[in-house]
Image (tube, rainbow, N blue to C red):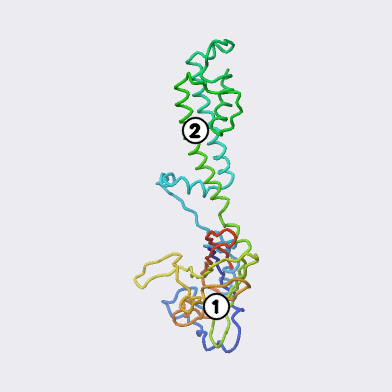
Amino acid sequence: KAPSALSVPPANVLEGDSMDQDVESPVAIHQPKLPKQARDDLPRHISRDRTKRKIQRYVRKDGKCNVHHGNVRETYRYLTDIFTTLVDLKWRFNLLIFVMVYTVTWLFFGMIWWLIAYIRGDMDHIEDPSWTPCVTNLNGFVSAFLFSIETETTIGYGYRVITDKCPEGIILLLIQSVLGSIVNAFMVGCMFVKISQPKKRAETLVFSTHAVISMRDGKLCLMFRVGDLRNSHIVEASIRAKLIKSKQTSEGEFIPLNQTDINVGYYTGDDRLFLVSPLIISHEINQQSPFWEISKAQLPKEELEIVVILEGMVEATGKPCSMLGHL
C-alpha cells in the first residue's frame, strides 16, 4: 500500500481566463462571519508572513506521518503485543534486543549447568577417572557456558557430553531445548518480518512535487502524477485521497485535522491503477468536491493538506504494501 500527501499549489498554477466563471469574487471585509483566511483584503505583510512561516505538516515530504503520541499512560498495552512492538522498533534497538535475548538465555542455562555440577561435587573430582560427572569435561563456569551454547544451538562438538547418571541434567536438557526452540522461532520470526517489510518499496514510487488545478475536458480538475521506477510492478494498485483540514461545525465545535474524502474515480473505477507508466490522477472540482467553495484568491491562504494513499501488492514478494509521500 502507498499513501502520499500533496501540498496545495500556489495561486499561479490556476491558469486560464476561462476559469473566471468558476472563481468566486473577492469577499468584502464587512462580512464578519467569514474566517480570516477566506478574506482577500488582508494586509500584505500578513500574507507575506504566512508564506515565510514554516508549516507543520501532517505528513512529511518523505511520506512519514508527523504525529507523535505523548502522555500515554497505559504503556503496558505495548507489552501485550510484544511481537509488533519489537517489529516497530528501530533497527539498532532490534539488533540489541536480539543479541541480549540469546546472551541472557545462554548465561542463565550456563549458570544452572554449573550449579548442578557444583552441587553434585563434579568440581572436586575433575581429575578422578572413577567419578561419573553430570557433564564430562565441565570444569568451571566458562565450560558450562560453552556447553549451554552448544546445547541450545545444537552445535554438538562432542567434547562435552551429558551422562546418563544425571537425571536433573536430562530434565534441564529437555527444558533448554524446548525454550531454545521457542526463542529461535520468536526472534528469527521477528527479524524476518522486519526485513521483509516493504517500507523501502516506497522509495521507487514517485509522486508529483505539486498538485495542479486546471481545465481538463471542459471541467476544472485537481491533478497530480504518480509513477513507479521499478520493473516489478505493484499488483492490484488502488489510490484514494484525503483532504486534511481543520473545520468548525455549525454548532461551533472545532475539529482539528478533519479528514474528508476526495473522489479520484471511485465510482468510475479510475482509482484502480495499472501502474506500468506514470499516470495522471484527476479529481473533478464539482459541487460534491471539498474544494468547491474555495476560490482562486482564497486557496493560497488555506491551511490544508492532501494525502494520497496508494495501496497494492508487491509483485516480487507478494506482500501488501502501503506507501506515503508528500507533494
Q: Is residue 270 above or below residue 312?
A: below
Q: Which mark is residue 282?
A: 1
**Secondary structure of the residue carrying numbered label 1:** strand
Distance (Cα) linking label 1 and label 2: 59 Å
Against 56, residue 135 (above or below) is above
Contact between labelled residues 2 and 1, with CB atoms less than 8 Å apart: no
Nearest the viewer among 64 and 143 is: 143
Q: Position of residue 327 (x, y in %)?
A: 59, 68
Q: Is residue 252 above or below residue 288?
A: above
- Which sits earlier in the primary sequence, circle 1 or circle 2? 2
Where is residue 198? Give x, y as percent: 57, 57
Give the camera-side residue of 94 and 151: 151
| Residue type, mark 1 in image | Ser
In the image shown, does 303 or 150 lie closer to the viewer? 150
Whole-percent x, y for residue 78 in the image: 44, 46
Task: Count the numbered circles shown.
Answer: 2
Pointer 2: residues within 10 angstroms few (<14), some, or many (20+)? some
Asked if residue 26 shows in the view, the reply is yes
Relative depth, front residue between 286 and 51: 286
Q: Which residue is mark 2?
A: 177
Could you say whether the residue bearing mark 2 is in a helix, strand or loop? Answer: helix
Q: Which mark is residue 78?
A: none
Q: Residue at x 50, y 28 (%)?
A: 109
What amino acid type should be assigned to the residue bearing mark 2?
Ser
Instruction: Decide: few, some or many residues near mark 1? Use Cα within 10 Å; few <14, some 14-19, many ≥20.
Output: many
Closer to the camera: disc 1 or disc 2? 2
Q: Quadrant of residue 228?
A: bottom right
Residue pictured at 53% horizontal, 20% vertical: 135
Q: Is residue 34 above or below residue 190?
A: below
